[in-house]
Image: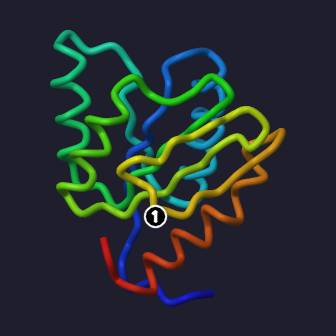
Amino acid sequence: MLPNHNEINRIYLSLKFDDHSKSIAFELEKFFKLLGIEMISGLGVEPRSISEKVFNKLKMDINMFVILITKTGTSDWINQEIGVAKEKGLSTLIIKNENFTKFKSGLLSDNEYITYEDNISEAYIGILEAINYLKICDIK
C-alpha cells in the first residue's frame, strides 16, 4: 500500500445532466464511496440558481476535479467549472468514453486522461493511479 500523505476525501465530478451520464456518475459515486471519498456534483435540485449551486459546491474543500465525458458529451457548465478548478489549483482528471467522444481539450490541452470503451469500471485502475499520485506527491 502506498503512503497516505495527503488524504483524498472529496472530489467534484463535472458531468452532463442526461440519463446516460447520470447512470455512469452513480457508478462512479459508488466506486469513490468504497474508497472513502465523497463525490460532489451539480446533481440534485436546490431552490437557487444553477450557477450559484455549482460555484458554491466547487468552493468546498475538494481534492480533485474530475471531468466525465460520455458518448453524450460534457457538462453545459464545463468552461466555468474548469475556470474555478484552475483558479483553486485543483488537479484535474479527465475520464472519457473512447468509442464516442471527441474532446477538444482547450484549457486542458496538457492533461492526461483515462479512457473506457464499454463500462466505466475499465477506468478504475487509472483513477486509482491518479489518487495514489496525489497522495504520494502531497499536492492538491
Q: Relative to residue 92, is residue 99 depicted above or below?
A: above
Residue at the spot 32% in from the left edge and 78% down from the top edge: 139
Query: Which SS class for mark 1?
Result: loop
- Image quadrant in which you'd find residue 126: bottom right
Q: Amino acid at mark 1?
A: Asp
| Residue 118 higher or lower than 44, as above or below | below
Instruction: Give residue 21's position: percent from left, percent from top.
Output: 60, 26
Q: Residues within 10 Å of mark 1 (few under 14, many from 20)?
A: few
Coordinates of residue 28 in the picture (x, y in percent): 61, 43
Q: Residue furthest top?
A: 47
Residue at the (36%, 78%) spot, across then down: 6
Tally of numbered discs: 1
The C terminus: image quadrant: bottom left
Could you tell me which residue is drawn at 21 percent across and 46 percent down? 84
Nearer the observer, 9 or 102: 102
Task: Please determine whether, in this image, residue 134 is positioned above or below residue 118.
Answer: below
| Image-based side of 97 in relation to 129, left or right | right
- Answer with the quarter of the image where residue 108 lies: bottom left
Which residue is pictured at 32% across the width and 36% down the height?
79
Residue where numbered disc 1 is placed: 110
| Residue 43 on image: x %, y % | 41, 24
